[in-house]
Amino acid sequence: MTELILASGSKTRADMLTSAGVPFSAVRPAVDEDAIKQALLADGAPARDIADALADVKARNVSYAHMGKLVLGSDQVIWKDGDLYSKATNREDAIATLKGLSGGTHELISAAVIYEDGQPIWRAAQSVKLSMRPLSDDYISWYLDQIGEAAYSSAGAYQLEGLGAQLFTRVDGDYFTVLGLPLLPVLDFLRRREVLPL
């Protein structure tokens, strides 16, 4: 059985794989995500390509040091009205993000790429449309007080599996994709590679 490595420091992605019964180890990739995003945005790349490129570079980075193993990289981006939303780095960023998403519908794209021996062998991307209710300044402040540092751990400053569910009126798409990994296609690939039982 080929060993799987998750090229990520994300607790949410690790928890998803663990809950789904996937055996894996995790290695945090050494990549400059912001520089990659800025270069792709400057080139006019669509959001789906940005998510795919970020997932790809993470998997590639870890794969070179772990030959003979499958390496899974994943990333997600949020796109609304031509703007790309990344993880907030401080409270001001989180406030600006939530104000930008408030009262509208945005697209969240999660991509996954699997490398083996330094080469990409599989990839997938899925998108979800999320409609956020109008948020008052007071509510945003209360919400950020409640979730604390979690506001800086995911694009959009929300976690749908937690208090972030209160921000939305509608979600069209796959739940796992919102959490940051197109899990069902990943599981299908792992079964075909006999990492998981058929």
Image (cartoon, helix red, strand yellow):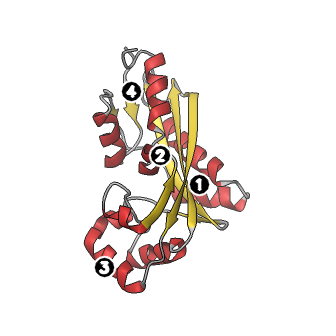
Determine the CA span between mark 4 and mark 2: 20 Å
Tell me if label 4 and label 3 are in contact, CB under 8 Å.
Answer: no
Closer to the camera: disc 1 or disc 3?
3
Label 1 Cα crowd, 10 Å radius (few <14 / some 14-19 / many 20+): some
Q: Examine the image and state in which quarter residue 87 appears.
A: bottom left
Sequence-first tag of 4 and 1: 4
Left or right, 158 with reference to 119: left
Q: Which residue is mark 2?
A: 177
Q: Amino acid at mark 3?
A: Trp
Percent from the top left, x then y, of residue 122?
57, 28
Q: Residue furthest right?
A: 43
Q: Where does the N terminus fall, quadrant-wise?
A: top left
Sequence-first tag of 4 and 3: 4
Q: Secondary structure at mark 4?
A: strand
Q: Which residue is mark 4?
A: 4
Q: Which residue is mark 3?
A: 142
Q: Amino acid at mark 4?
A: Leu
Of residues 34 and 107, the one drawn nearer to the viewer in this rendering: 107
Sequence-first tag of 4 and 2: 4
Determine the CA span between mark 3 and mark 2: 27 Å
* 30 up-or-down from 64: above or below: below
Of residues 48 and 33, the one drawn nearer to the viewer in this rendering: 48
Q: Secondary structure at mark 3?
A: helix
Of residues 129 and 19, the one drawn nearer to the viewer in this rendering: 129
Q: Secondary structure at mark 1?
A: helix
Sequence-first tag of 3 and 2: 3
Q: Which residue is mark 1?
A: 36
Percent from the top left, x then y, of residue 168?
44, 65
Closer to the camera: disc 4 or disc 1?
4
Closer to the camera: disc 4 or disc 3?
3
